[in-house]
Each structure stands twice: as structure tokens, then as C-alpha cells.
Amino acid sequence: MSHDHPPFEIHVHGDIPLRDDVDYTHIQEALRPLWSYVGARSLIDAAASAYEEEPGIRFDTNERVLHLCWTIEGGEDFRLAIEEACMGLNDIAATGAAIEVSFYDLEFDEEEAPPDAEARDDFLMCFVGPTPAAIMQVQRDLLVQDVVNLMERHFDASELGGVVQAIDQLFANRFDAMVNSLQLGKPPRGGGGHGGPRKPRHLH
């Protein structure tokens, strides 16, 4: 995809553990929306970041982790590309993981802009995982971390158990609602098996 005057510098950051049976071909196909977005003919052609100090898109074969620290220029339509890439990563991810996408306004000049003008910088958090439960677990862990960090300014960590329990209950309710919606209209499975996704840990 060609962008003659891209309005944003876009930075993609995340570490995604991949299944043991995944190879580079699978990764290239999963990330096709990203390398196609920049007009490359393959993942190798697009893997380098705009900044030399950033590793770009790299697969650690020993750790089985796909590292994303990749900066390009683009527009709002990149949101669709990253959404499609996340769907592909769901199929090869070993566990849940978060991907941060930052948009920096290239057209905003702080020195020349009117006093009340603001840059169109934006931030997007994406989640991938092999199951809805794995994705929800990452969302839960990040929320707990953010809330605890915020509240520790005012309370001791030992006082926050109830807050964490409340967050777990919110995610448990969401998970149960998702499972129930998946079961609507489905015939019961034989042998008493449960056909829904496995509930994340901590969600009781």
C-alpha cells in the first residue's frame, strides 16, 4: 500500500510466544497484512524498522518468541492491517500476549501550531492468543498491574487483595457470558464434555 504523505509514524511493540510447530512460513503468512501494508513482497523485505536501533520484526528460534519493535509511516488504515495480523497471530500463538501500537502525528508542528492545537497522537492496545481465555488472561493481568501500581501510591499492597478479587470477578462474569453466548443454539456434546473455552486462571 502506498502512502505519498503518511500522516503518522507508527510504532508496533510486543513479544508473542509461538507454538513449537510454527516456522517462518507460518509467521510470514500471519503477518502478511503488515508487510503488504508497506508494499513489500515478503516479510524479510519489510522486517527492518525505520530506526536502525530497533530490531524490527524478529523471530527468536531458541525462545520461540516473535519480537516486534517496528516503526513505519502510514495512516489510519493501519488499524485494519494490525487487526488482520492479530487474527493471523491467534492461529500460531502459544499463549496470550499484548501488542502496543503507537501513532505519532507527523503533520503536527509544535512550534508553528496555535496554542490550543493538539497533535493527533494515539495509542492502541491489541491482544492475541490461542483461545479467548488466553487473551482474557493477558487483559486481566495488565489491568491488575495498572490498578495496583496506581493504588499503591495511596495504599499498601497488602490492602489491595479485595481490589484484585473484584477485577477477577469482573473478568469471570465476562468469561461466563462469552461461554454462554457460544453455547446458544449448540446441541449438547456427548459424554458430558464441555465444549466451551477453558476459563483463565484466577477467574473463579
Image (cartoon, rainbow, N blue to C red):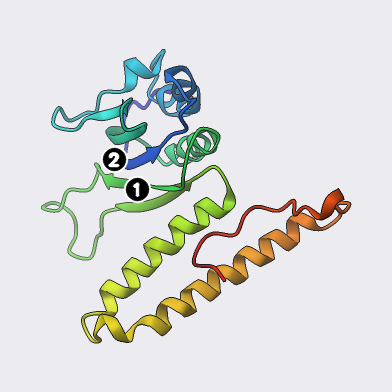
Q: Amino acid at mark 1?
A: Glu
Quarter the N terminus occupies: top left
Is 10 placed above or below 43 here?
below
- Residue located 19% across and 33% down the image: 54
| Residue 56 rendering spot, x and y as whole percentages | 26, 29
Mark 2 surroundings within 10 Å by alpha-carbon count, few (fewer than 14), some (14 through 19), many (20 or more)? many
Q: Are marks 2 and 1 in contact (CB under 8 Å)?
A: yes
Instruction: Quadrant for residue 106, please give it.
Output: top left
- Residue located 74% across and 62% down the image: 180
Mark 1 surroundings within 10 Å by alpha-carbon count, few (fewer than 14), some (14 through 19), many (20 or more)? some
Q: Which mark is residue 100?
A: 1
Q: Amino acid at mark 2?
A: His
Q: Which residue is mark 2?
A: 11
| Residue 187 rendering spot, x and y as whole percentages | 89, 51
Farthest top residue in view: 41
In three-dimensional space, the C-alpha distance between marks 2 and 1, rounded to whole angstroms, equals: 8 Å
Relative depth, front residue between 152 and 19: 19
| Residue 33 rendering spot, x and y as whole percentages | 48, 28
Secondary structure found at label 2: strand
Farthest left residue in view: 111
Is 57 placed above or below 116 here?
above
- Residue located 49% across and 39% down the image: 86
Q: Which mark is residue 168?
A: none
Which mark's residue is nearer the viewer, 2 or 1? 1
- Residue located 26% across and 54% down the image: 119
Quarter the C terminus occupies: bottom right
First in residue order: circle 2 vs circle 1 = 2
Farthest front residue in view: 191
